[in-house]
Image: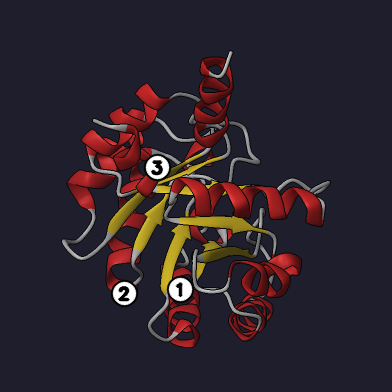
Amino acid sequence: MDREKILSTADHTLLLQTATWEEIKEICDDGMKYHTASVCIPPCYVRDAKKYVKDQLKICTVIGFPNGNMTTAVKVFETEDAILNGADEIDMVINIGALKAKDYEYVQGEIEQIKEVCGGRILKVIIETCLLTEEEKIKMCEIVTNAGADYIKTSTGFSTSGATFEDVTLFAKHVGQDVKIKAAGGISSLEDGEKFIELGASRLGTSKIVKIIKGEEIKTDY
């Protein structure tokens, strides 16, 4: 698989608490240069990033991040605000406690409400697989499908671990035909990225793949 294919699936990501506008501009520049699927950035930078990239790059942001246990009303407002500021795609975190309490109606209803305010924009649902049992992961495949979201996403990258090959394989077996898969968290090589795509991921949430390619390009200049 060539690099362009892998890059075209990447949501080039910078969500660290310490992220500055200068760093956000740098990943936007990288996203435009390497033709990534989007850049995934904190909500506070969406407006400026959208003005900066114009129509050259999709801007993705996160909702209820990273813990997911805000009220639904807060998440809906966050989503509306992000869209008003120019977000093209939304990655939301589920209420994990509600899932573990088997309050499936709450979890699905929240996703449905956020999808509604997204309009036609892509909604990716982060379920934080490292905190879930296999049964809960399978249940979330069902809920995400029934809620009409566009993607199920493995991880925030801020918990105990990130994407695994096993979880993407599990998703591929259990999501509905209209739901795509985003692997995120800990993807640190082109080989891993390629493997996730082969297993069924359509997007990769990663901060490292572009850095790897930039580093290799620098080496070839000497």
Q: CA distance from mark 2 to mark 3?
A: 26 Å
Rendering coords of residue 80 (x, y %): 61, 85
Image height of 208 relative to 131, above or below: above
Label 1: state its secondary structure: helix
Q: Residue 111, labelled with which disc? A: 1
Q: Visible in this render: residue 199? A: yes
Q: Which residue is mark 3?
A: 7
> Looking at the image, do the residues carrying marks 2 and 1 touch, with CB atoms under 8 Å apart?
yes
Q: Earlier in the sequence, mark 2 or mark 3?
A: 3
Q: Earlier in the sequence, mark 1 or mark 3?
A: 3
Image quarter where the N terminus lies is: top left
Rate crowding at label 2 as few (under 14), some (14 to 19) or many (20 or more) other CA atoms within 10 Å.
some
Quadrant assignment, res 133: top left
Q: Residue furthest front?
A: 222
Q: Which residue is mark 2?
A: 148
Q: Visible in this render: residue 166? A: no
At 51% from the left and 68% from the top, the residue drawn is 90
Q: Residue 129, labelled with which disc? A: none
For badge 3, the amino acid type reads Leu
Q: Earlier in the sequence, mark 2 or mark 1?
A: 1
Rendering coords of residue 98 (x, y %): 54, 62
Image quarter where the C terminus lies is: top right
Q: Nearer the viewer, mark 2 or mark 3?
A: 3
At 45% from the left and 24% from the top, the residue drawn is 189
Label 2: state its secondary structure: loop
